[in-house]
Amino acid sequence: MNSCACHARDTVNTPSCLSHVPVFAQLREAEVDLLHSVMRTSQYQKGEVIFHEGDRSDALFVVNRGIIKLTKLEDNGKEHIIRLLFPGDFFGQFALLQEKPHYASAIAADATGVCRILRSDFLDILRRDPNTAARFMTALSAQLEEADAWAAVLTLLEADRRLAKMLLYFRRKAAPNSEAFMLPVSKKELAGLIGATPETLSRKLRQLSDDGVLTVSGRQLQIRDAAALRRLAGEA
């Protein structure tokens, strides 16, 4: 893991974390400069742990590139993915604001860049700028709403609809301007994410392929009938 300052003006090939995150989108130039001055970035390889469940938080984390898995250990010791984070998503905020241990572990799903702002610096910025504080609270509210929506998906909907919703979500996050995208996790991990067995997932994907809704090649997917997939997800 390597750490360095995350200055947008000094980094040609890597966009600033601030350019990804809606809560920071309307900051004035002076506020952007202030955040850049206290923001640091770390690079992680696939499988590296960013923090463990139960660790104390001292920073707000923002995904700059790559994908992060939030996981919890089940009673049998198996890792269960509870959420995937994409560029622009932020995490660690609940432990940060309440000084509580992280409720889950954060693990790089692939080569990942993560920016972080230390607790003392971030809270100082929120105290100085009520507008940023208000936008941050709005973003927290949206994140909680999304978490509630996913809880409903996993507990109330049938496997077909859970899978369709997850695939549409992946496409919106990973390739919003294309019908082709790569699954961000393995099929086994996707099965766990939607509460299905790997065998059930394979059968459902095969059925979608046979019905002309998807083309599946390994982890590469091509949506051939977006309207049908949205209907299956209950989003039409």
Image: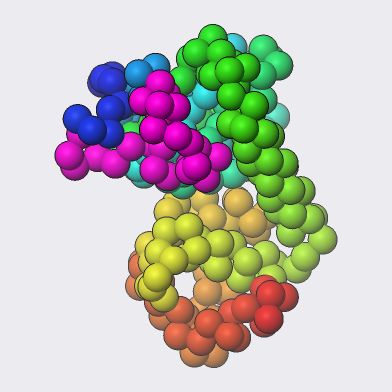
| Residue 37 location (% of width, % of height) | 35, 18
Task: Pick the quarter of the image with the N terminus.
Answer: top left
Any magenta on residue 127? no
59 horizontally vs 232: left or right: left
Is any part of residue 201 visible from this angle?
A: no
Q: Which residues are magenta?
A: 11-35
Residue closest to the eye, 6 or 181: 6
Residue extending farthest to the bottom is 211
- Examine the rendered structure and indicate whether residue 225 appears above or below residue 92: below
Residue closest to the eye, 218 or 7: 7
| Residue 147 location (% of width, % of height) | 70, 46
Any magenta on residue 15? yes
| Residue 179 location (% of width, % of height) | 41, 75
Which of the 4 image quadrants contains residue 164? bottom right
Q: How many marks?
A: 0
Please tell me which residue is depicted at 46% across the width and 20% down the height of the picture. Answer: 117
- Examine the rendered structure and indicate whether residue 67 appears above or below residue 169: above
| Residue 213 location (% of width, % of height) | 51, 85
Please tell me which residue is depicted at 54% across the width and 19% down the height of the picture. Answer: 125
Please tell me which residue is depicted at 55% across the width and 40% down the height of the picture. Answer: 23
Residue closest to the eye, 230 or 12: 12
- Examine the rendered structure and indicate whether residue 176 appears above or below residue 49: below
Please tell me which residue is depicted at 51% across the width and 86% down the height of the picture. Answer: 225
Task: Pick the quarter of the image with the C terminus.
Answer: bottom right
